[in-house]
Amino acid sequence: MKLNKKKLALAVSGALLSMSMLVAGCGGGGEKKAADSGDIKIGIVAEMTGGNATYGTSMVNGMKLALKEVNDKGGVMGKKLDLVIADSKSEPAEAANAMSKLINQDKTPIVSGIFTSSSAIAACNVSETSKIPFLAIGATNPKVTLDDKTGKAKPNTFRVCFIDPFQGTVGANFVLDTLQLKKAVIFVDNSSDYSKGLASFFKEAYLKKGGEIVGEEAYLQKDADFKAVLTKIKTLNPDVLYVPGYYEEVGKIVKQARELGIDIPVVGGDGWDSPKLAEIAGAGPLNNTFFTNHYSPEADNAESKAFVAAYEKEYKSKPDAPAVLGYDGIKLLADSITRAGGADSAKVTAALAATKDFPAVTGKTSLDANHDAVKSAVIIEFKDGNQTYKATVNP
């Protein structure tokens, strides 16, 4: 059938109007349904694979436990929390990619996660550009929250853990005051912002208090044979070896040091906290080793005991620092969303910045002007492959 121009124009106009109404109806209904369903999405960047995978696994376990507790009590302002997890593969570049995906594809208004400093520094460049609040879980290097160029806090980046200037000082004081060891060698991972930063802060505090650094050596992540350097270290005859690294390399260093007859105390930082460390090093070689950490499951307070019991029931294992910091992180975000009156990114950023005396399992937590957590640290000692609580150190 042929149509004249007027009828054709009317027919096309009617069809377009009908299509427009149909699309508008579907779109409007879908948007209303999404708004009504109301889940609050929190993006999580985590080291689920790669060399630091135990951090990400434990961290996400702790987060899921906190999520369950929050949602079982009605959620936040009547809305459920939902975690959207992206794997950083334990690499800074992949952490940045994961952050970009969560913000640009998954549209998460809030992001958390990451235990390693280099990955957190790379990822927060993305969240800062997008003005999305990011709560780092275990990244302790000052550069995570501090802008090198301005010397000021990054506006949208926060952390729930203490920072390395504090951790390094705690470690140095423990070596000098408790172990009473005056000559140290520092063995640092030159590919890690975390390791280099912590070594620097330990050295500064150790020298200031009268200690002597008799040697400084370096390795790279994924190195496996440390015997040549350890042989050199042995000739320096130090009282203590300070190794501020991650568990994969630390385990091999401790094992090989003991094989070479280096029986002095070995001390490190929170990067040691992984069940894999004892598997790699062996139980015997880890005797006479110590590290600074965020938490001990032996902590004797009601909050900690309740958390440990819940975690062991859920996962049939003791929680480590990434697990408890992940748990605290989700609880702090839930509290911040409540204080913000919703999940608006800018309002949550302001609420995070105003955090004071939050009752975290790892200790009462306030965020300072640099968006860093002010809280206590613990000293952990290995005995026959098991972590044992040594002491708590307040800021």
Image (spheres, rainbow, N blue to C red):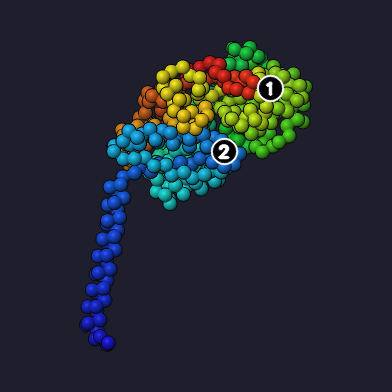
Q: Residue at x 47, y 48 (%)?
A: 100
Kindly give the residue lying farthest to the bottom in the view shown.
2
Q: Is residue 326 visible?
A: no
Measured as percent of width and height from the top left, residue 109 is found at 38, 44
Q: Which label sits on residue 284?
A: 1
Which numbered disc, 2 or 1, marks the residue closer to the eye?
1
- Above or below: residue 176 compared with residue 75: above
Residue position for label 2: 53
Q: Does dot 2 land on a helix, a strand or a loop?
A: helix
Residue type for callout 2: Ala
Of residues 95 and 318, the one drawn nearer to the viewer in this rendering: 318
Q: Amino acid at mark 1?
A: Gly
Q: Position of residue 119 (x, y in %)?
A: 54, 39
Question: Which residue is found at the position 52% from the left and 37% from the top?
Answer: 57
> Looking at the image, which is closer to me, 328 or 209?
328
The residue positioned 53% from the left and 15% from the top of the image is 391
Report whether 97 appears left or right of 358. right
Task: Say whether disc 2 or disc 1 marks the residue closer to the N-terminus.
Answer: 2
From what the image shows, is residue 262 above or below residue 64? above
Count neighbours of disc 2 (C-alpha within 10 A) and say few if under 14, some if 14 to 19, many if 20 or more: some
Whether residue 223 sits left or right of residue 130 in the image: it is right
Between the C-alphas of marks 2 and 1, the distance is 24 Å
Q: Tell me, yes or no, if residue 54 can be seen here.
A: yes
Q: Secondary structure at mark 1?
A: loop
